[in-house]
Image (cartoon, helix red, strand yellow):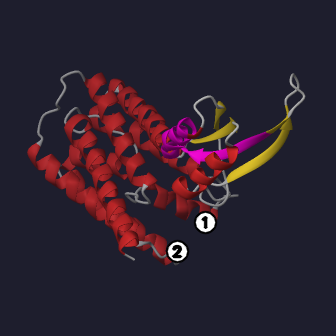
Amino acid sequence: MSKKILEQVKSYVMITLGLLLFAFGWTAFLIPSGIVGGGVSGISSLIFFTTGMPVGIMSLIINIILVLIAMKILGAKFGINTVFGILMSSFFFILLQHFIKQPLVDDPFMCALIGAMLSGLGVGIAFSNGGNSGGTDIIALIVTNFYNVSPGRVIIYIDILIVASSYLVFGSVEKIVYGYVVMGVFGYTLDMVIEGNKQSYQMMIFSKNNAEIADRIGNEIQRGVTLLKGTGWYTKHEQEVLLVVAQKQDRQAIMKIIKECDDSAFISIAKVSGVFGKNFDRIKI
């Protein structure tokens, strides 16, 4: 039980750190530079530039409204992670915007790049640990309930509209371009963090000590090992091959085990684009 509690605590600590980075990217670079990105944060920024209402407060209000509408229409039950994410991201926006009045970098283009990368990194960390910050994904959930369109497409359309709306506030095409730069960099960084965190490897091990290696991988790393029967074409000798599919964080530990058991082992390592099943991703169709 204590291990499960520690994992939960670690998860919430990482979600909090991710949301802090997300809010910092906006409040230290994008908002002071007058750059509008997508999502509820973008809507809240437009309102801030128009009325002076703090982004964090508007973000909280908009998210609460969206959650209530979704619950009314869909009867959806939002988990504690969604509520936690909405509250924490709004809190960090309010806190940081109170102290940061000027962008930390003078060049608007650099602000767009740095702000987008930090916010993408933050959301990626939060997503990887089961958290989120509410936002336009709730709108997508509502829209897809009535129309046969993918949530991802809905979110893209909404973000494009939000960024384009910044022209009504600033009257500047340059600001729109910066906003689309933010969208692109944010999406790329988010994908890199999430996919990088899920990166898996397929390892094929040729060794005279296969049994020892397989036992240690199973006992110490808790990864499954498959024994394949093969024949060396040159030697015409039968050869047993170990097949291991492991996650990124397990790779070095497995390599250490192989080296300790047989430092002359032949190893082939390949990245795999997706691994589904026990201890990996679930099939989602």
**Image height check: is 189 above or below 69?**
above
State yes or no: residue 246 in magenta.
yes
Counting from the top left corner in percent of width and height, residue 137 is at 48, 56
Residue 175, quarter of the rendered image: top left
**Predominant SS along the magenta part:** helix
Residue 106 location, quadrant: top left
Amino acid type of the residue that numbered disc 1 sits on in the rendered structure: Asn
Per the image, the residue denoted by label 1 is 145
Q: What residue is shown at x 69% (from left), y 44% (from top)?
A: 210
Q: Which mark is residue 73?
A: 2
Name the element at disc 2.
helix
Q: Is residue 135 left or right of residue 46?
A: right
Q: Quadrant of the C terminus?
A: bottom right
Q: Residues within 10 Å of mark 1 (few under 14, many from 20)?
A: few
3D distance between C-alphas at marks 2 and 1: 9 Å
Magenta residues, start to end: 240-260
* Image position, residue 24 (x, y; %): 23, 43
92 to the left or right of 215: left
**Residue at image point 49% right, 43% down:** 253
**Is any part of residue 62 visible from this angle?**
no
Q: Quadrant of the N terminus?
A: bottom left
Q: Nearest the camera: 146 or 23?
A: 23
